[in-house]
Amino acid sequence: MTTDYKVRVYDRTGTLKYEPDNWRRFSFTRTVNAAGALAIAFPTSAPLVDAVALDWRFEVWRRDVGNGLAWRCEFEGLVRDVERYADDRGERETSIICPGVLSLLGRRIVAYKAGTANRSTFSAQKAETIAKSLVRRNATSNGTTGDGRMRDVDETRISVAADAATGATLDYNCAWQNLLSALQEVAQLGGGDYDLVRTGAAAWEFRWYNGQRGTDRSATVRFGLDYGNVTLPRVTWGTLTEATVAIVGGQGEAAARSVVVRNGANYLATYHGVETFVEAMQYSTTGGLNTAGDAALYAAQARRETSFEVVQTPASFYGVHYDFGDLVTVIIEGYTAVKQVASASITVDEYGERLTIGTVDK
C-alpha cells in the first residue's frame, strides 16, 4: 500500500490528545448530506481506550506522495460508542464508533409547533433559506422557548453561514421531524447539498452548496471498464418498486378533504402509472401538498443504480483527479450518465486499502 494514513484524537475542547499508530484496522464512509461513520479497532491495552469519552473527535488523514496527494483529513467523527471484546484466541480488542459530524444535526428535531411561520412552516422560500433557518433555530442558541421552540437548544458548537437564498422555491412543513432528515428532503427538492465545516477547535459552520457539494468533472473523469478504473461493474433499472403517481391528502374530511395528484418524472400513461397515497394533513395550501407529493415521488423514484469497485490509476486517483461530492461520468454496460460521487468508503487493514465509491443521480 503506497497510501499513508494517520489518526488524530482530540478531546471535547478540540485539544489534540493522541496520535496513535497502534490501530489495527479501520473503516469509514463519507456520505453527501448524511453523517457516515468510522469504526476503528485498537488493542484494549492502548492508553486511549480508557481515556476516550463521548464527543471526543477522531480524524483520519490520508496521503499518497507517488500520486501527488498531500496529507488531508478524509474523515472526522465524534465518539458515540465503544465496544470491547475478545476473539476466539482470547485476544482483547476495542472498537470505537464515531459518526460523522453531521450527526450533530441528527440529534435535533424541528421542535416548533405545526404552522409556526418560518420555523416549522415555510411558504415560497428558497431551499437554502429554509435549510439555514432550520439549523439556526434547532441547532444553535437562536432556538429558544422565547422564540417558540419547545426547548432551548443546548448546542454551542454550530454556527450558520450567511444566506445567499439559492435553490428552488419551496413550500415546506416539517414540525417534529428529525432535523437531519428534514434537511435531506430540502436538499433533494431544492437542488443543493450541505455540510458542517470545521472553523475552530470545536466549532463547525453549516454551509449550503447550490447544485452539488463538489466540482463538475464529468467532462474529464470517466469510470468504466474501457478506462481500467473499475472492476465488477453492475447497472440495474431499479423500477421494480417505483411509484410514479402521488395522490396527496391534505386537510378536511370525507368529501371536503383537499386532494392533489402529482406525476413523477418516470410516469408513463398505461405502462407505468404506479400510484401511492401520501398523507399530508400538515399542509393547508396546494403548494404545500404539491411539495409533499413531489418529495414522496422523489424518494420512490427509480434511478439507474450503478455499482463498481474503484481501481486507482495514475489518471484516476481519488483525492487528486476526483473527490467526494464531484460530478463524474459513469459508463457501464452501455449505460452512460453523469453521477455524483455521493459516498466514499475506505477500509484499511493488514491487506491494504480498499476504496469503494457510491454514485447517485444529481
Image: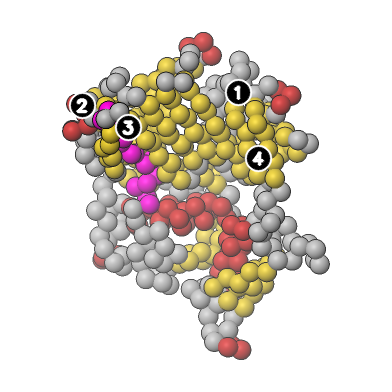
Q: Earlier in the sequence, mark 1 or mark 4?
A: 4
Q: Are marks 1 and 4 in contact (CB under 8 Å)?
A: no
SS at circle 3: loop
Marks 1 and 4 sit apart, C-alpha to C-alpha, by: 15 Å
Name the amino acid type tagged 4: Thr
Residue at coordinates 52% horizontally, 60% vertically from top-left?
Answer: 125
Residue bearing the label numbered 4: 306
Marks 2 and 1 sit apart, C-alpha to C-alpha, by: 36 Å
- Work out whether 144 lies above or below 16: below
Marks 2 and 3 sit apart, C-alpha to C-alpha, by: 18 Å
Marks 1 and 3 sit apart, C-alpha to C-alpha, by: 34 Å
Residue bearing the label numbered 3: 88
Q: Are marks 2 and 3 in contact (CB under 8 Å)?
A: no
Marks 4 and 3 sit apart, C-alpha to C-alpha, by: 38 Å
Marks 2 and 4 sit apart, C-alpha to C-alpha, by: 42 Å
Name the amino acid type tagged 2: Ser
Is residue 95 inside the magenta stretch? yes
x, y percentage for residue 284? 52, 76
SS at circle 4: strand
Instruction: Say which mark, if any, is on residue 311.
Output: 1
Residue at coordinates 47% horizontally, 30% vertically from top-left?
Answer: 346
Is residue 334 inside the magenta stretch? no
Residue at coordinates 24% horizontally, 53% vertically from top-left?
Answer: 154
Foreground pick, 291 / 63: 63
- Work out whether 162 lies above or below 289: above
- Span highlighted in magenta in the image: 91-106
